Image (cartoon, helix red, strand yellow):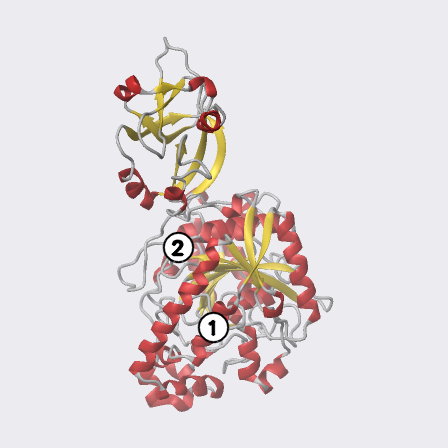
Amino acid sequence: MHKFLPLGDMPSLLRRYASGELSPTQMVEAIHADIQNDPDHVWISVLPLESLRDYARKVEAQDMTSLPLYGVPFAIKDNIDLADIPTTAACPAFAYTPSRSAVVVQKLIDAGAIPIGKTNLDQFATGLNGTRSPYGACRNAFNPEYISGGSSSGSAVAVAKGQVCFSLGTDTAGSGRIPAAFNNLIGYKPTKGWLSAHGMVTACRSLDTVSVFAHTAADAARLLTISAAYDTADIYSREREGHGFDFGAAPHFRFGIPRQQQLKFFDNHESERLFNDAVARMQALGGEAIEIDFEPFLEAARLLYEGPWVAERYAAIQSFFELHGDQIIAPVREIIATAKQRSAADAFNGIYQLRSIKQQADQVWTQVDCLLAPTAGTIYPIHAMQQDPIRLNTNLGYYTNFMNLLDYAAVAVPAGFQRDGLPFGITLAAPAHQDEPLLHLAHRWQQAYSLPLGATGIALSPSTLFPIASRSGQIRIAVCGAHLSGLPLNEQLTSRHGRLVTSTTTSSDYKLYALPGHPPLRPGLIRVSKNEQGVAIEVEVWELPVRELGSFVASIPAPLGIGSITLANNETVLGFLCEYYAINNAKDISHLGGWRNYLRQLDNP
């Protein structure tokens, strides 16, 4: 391997550029020389050396501070377009040469990243193992006798071997996560629609998403900030929404794990040991483990290949399949051919069934903040996978196939090594738009339990910082009366997905009154002038989704309203205030310090 390789996380490379140790031109020359010999079947096509130099020179002509991905090399799964380079989807007869790059690819190039080439995959992104390609079975970065995971096989191995800093894959059923687990990487599967799919050969268009392989969650987060955007050219594109409670940054959070009898490791006792270790480690980070019923998730997973969604794979390449079906390798052709047995009625019945399953599965989010599961229960040698391709591939998808069907986001995270040296990984999952808490938690995990990066043994950069600001979509509101925890109107907060943040007091310039009227009894909080004597009043601060605020405010009767309240720490939040005229007939209870003390006095006159 060239002296400038292997590559690690992005900050490490950027520091080398900044110090003058390495230039983008030297870097691409080193990579190009290194990957000419490709015994692991990672690459389908590599850009000519002069093209790579052109990319490097364009980067070098600009200031480093103007390009967040200055000279960072990346790989592209060969079902995603790169201008003037053939897109094959691992089927030579299908290949075409696009004139424009995929939207996500272009955003990365515009930020200074340098595309090295196109990587191997399970043909038409149909498989989770990495052996279903006429370009050869992509070999595991740690042990070449084992599978790399698929379908984004080459993309993962290119990062794990230090040939690039990050790569793009795609994910329908786990293709952006299984290869990460098998090669000791972060595999980030965004919320569907966050990253444009325009310029991608889809497998199941309604389910697919571009995915990211990187050494660190921090790198994945950087790439998210650069590549995510609403795209009118992609009919499944969607705007990012606020993520709500940031469990990834919270000192205490709840994570769900499948019931013991629902866990499957397919006779791999090492995976079972490592998963139990991961649960204990997550608890040490402040997580509370809660067993959940995993059956609805498994039921959804079965729909992907046993239900009508296989017909979407046929729809993606229908004309090619009819004209050139003999050019498709056997396992992929056999899977897609079953679509012809499905009717339109089957499709609608499948949609109805999935909606019902999702209603059941989504109930888990009332109990937990995220899920923790093995990314895969086991790993197989290449020869075993080739001898039993359907059954073993199905085993690999046990913990992954449901994710896009149920519209969840997920991050696969390295979680140790088997005694034979093969990596093991876990996956963290949460509902759509909660990507940032997931990445925060994955980052905390990596900081607490540092592992060597990829297959290279490079250490995690100690100065790696998490790069994205919170987009919570939440607003804080202070309550001081019947909306307090356990009191009659608290349900108006909890039914709107409100979450208690803290119990505290106002600053010491407020008065509290008991307003006349029928139950539920109501408080009147008034801020006094500088000439009056006020006190600190007990309040609870709740977080409420912004979208719920309007209906909450509309439910508040006069003379109460929502205004700004200053807390004891000088933070200003929204909160209940009373119109001044109403205190004429009210009882001043400020000396009691809060509403609960007033209620206790009523109970014990």
Q: Secondary structure at mark 1?
A: helix
The outermost residue toward the bottom is: 326
- Identify the residue at image location x=55%, y=51%: 254
Is residue 70 at least partly visible in the picture? no
Tell me the crowding category of disc 1: few under 14, some 14 to 19, or many 20 or more residues within 10 angstroms, Cα based.
some
Query: Is 387 placed above or below 251 here?
Result: below
The foreground one among 318 and 239 is: 239
Please tell me in which quadrant of the rendered image residue 156 appears. bottom right
The x, y position of residue 412, in whole percent, is: 54, 60
- Identify the residue at image location x=50%, y=56%: 25
Q: Which mark is residue 23?
A: none
- Identify the residue at image location x=48%, y=71%: 401
Is residue 105 at least partly visible in the picture? yes
Please tell me whether mark 1 or mark 2 is closer to you in this view: 1
Please tell me in which quadrant of the rendered image residue 375 appears. bottom right
Q: Secondary structure at mark 2?
A: helix
Q: Which residue is label 2 attached to?
A: 227
